[in-house]
Image: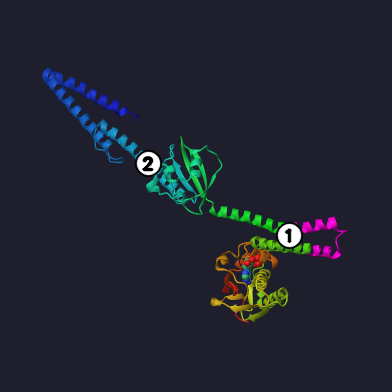
Amino acid sequence: MRPAGYVWGGFGGALLGFVALALIVWPLLGGTVALLVFTALLAALFVYHIRSLKKLVLWTREPIGAPLPQAFGVWDYVFADLSRRSRASLDQRDRLAQALARFREATSAMPSGVILLSAENFIEWINPAAEMHFGLDGERDTGKPITNLVRQPDFVAYLCGERTAEPLTCRMARQAGLVLSIQIVPFGEEQSMVLSRDVTQFEKLETMRRDFVANVSHELKTPLTVVSGFLETLDDMLDELPPEDARRYLRLASEQAMRMQSLVDDLLALAALETSARASYDETVEMAPLIQTVLGEAQALSAGRHEISLELDGPVSLRGSRKEIHSALLNLASNAVRYTPAGGSIRLCWNVAAGGGARFAVIDTGLGIEAQHIPRLTERFYRVDRGRSRESGGTGLGLAIVKHALGRHQATLQIESQPGKGSTFSALFPAERVARPQI
Ligand code: ADP
């Protein structure tokens, strides 16, 4: 039926009924009785419409989705139409609710923080990542102005200032160490969205990179200044300088050049450890000859100033890279020589460790290290005593190289030390790296 056709149908039907009744009743019963019959019919019609209308009004006050009341005649059509529309809008509401739930689920799972703000910067919605980033609680804080809850001045200035595409890097005062990258994205009429990303790790790496560049430049600058100073002096005064002075200057310049050389070598070794693929990690490395080589190198460096002994009763071989294991063990042994005053003793020990692993320990009776320095020793360029490290030819990169080389073999470095008594540096290899049980 066409829209509202049934209304006209109902109306027409009623009219026809009246006309038919008038034609039959009037001649049969006479004027007064016919009038009474008409009045009664009209009253019944009136009651029927009023009752149906009342049902409709009561139904509209019910919650959406309530079943429609029963009716007959034209009202049955009206109610059927309404029922269809109500079902369609319920379906649409369900679909929207599902879409909204999916959107919330997705934004809740996002590692980035999202806060929806009204035009007046009142919080309308917040996801769990943003709750963590800003120390907020969605249930408690929704509907409150964000500037009352996050009072950090740089954030407030960024939020209330002119909008830019440039994100703000913000060190959160409430949560020590947390650094966020924050961006405000306008949407809708005058609403906005605060997007936050945890960039703490990235900032840390960036600081490390800056420090590293500054350290390398500083380490190279000092010997370079010395070398160029000597060369200038030689250039200016070559004719007047006694030959032994000229030779001394050349020797000192060459020492500084060697210092730069070892720094560059260590930097390259570290870069290779950090970037190269683990190609030769399945080499079988015979440990006895390797440790004998390390002993020989330590003795050469000591030049007879220390008593160096060797204890070999660990596994025959390890699986890994010979070059990297050698570099790690040699750095430990050469540190022991460099930080043990003449007359001290050094022991190189290769043993079986608990759980089927292996342990290479270098035990010295040297200067020792105060406890507060120990956790930082493997940082690049960290030295307990800068002067002493340089004097002994150190670059400040030795233990960083050890840590990386061991890490690539799933091995760890253990440091025990007592100031004035000596230190024990141990490389602990896991059982998976041991190729055969015992020598
Ligand atoms: P460096 O080139 O300065 O020796 P390393 O990374 O090898 O750099 O060592 C870092 C610092 O650890 C050294 O500067 C030194 O202060 C300390 N250190 C390392 N090994 C020993 C040791 N056997 N005894 C005392 N101090 C040590």
Secondary structure beneath disc 1? helix
The answer, for residue 323, to whether it is visible in the render is yes
Q: Is residue 118 above or below residue 105?
A: above
Residue 430 in percent (x, y) is at 57, 72
Mark toward the viewer: 1 or 2: 1
Nearer the observer, 313 or 262: 262
- Secondary structure mostly seen in magenta is helix
Pick the residue in front: 314 or 88: 314
Q: Which residues are magenta?
A: 222-251
The residue at which mark 2 appears reads as 93
Pointer 2: residues within 10 angstroms few (<14), some, or many (20+)? few
Left/right of residue 215 with respect to residue 82 in the rendered view: right
Give the residue displayed 61% in from the left and 62% down from the top: 379
Q: Is mark 2 within 8 Å of ligand 1?
A: no
10 Å crowding of disc 1: few (<14), some (14-19), many (20+): many
For residue 378, which quarter of the picture?
A: bottom right
Q: Quadrant of the N terminus?
A: top left
Q: Is residue 93 left or right of residue 221?
A: left
Q: How many marks overall? A: 2
Q: Who's the residue at 54% across and 77% down the image?
A: 354
List the residue tagged with mark 1.
223
Place of residue 43 in the rendered image (x, y in percent of width and height, measured from the top left): 17, 26
**If you read the primary sequence from the N terminus, does the residue marked by circle 1 or circle 2 appear first?**
2
Residue 331 image point, x, y percent: 66, 70
> Above or below — where is 143 with respect to 295?
above
- Looking at numbered disc 2 in the image, what kind of residue is underneath it? Arg
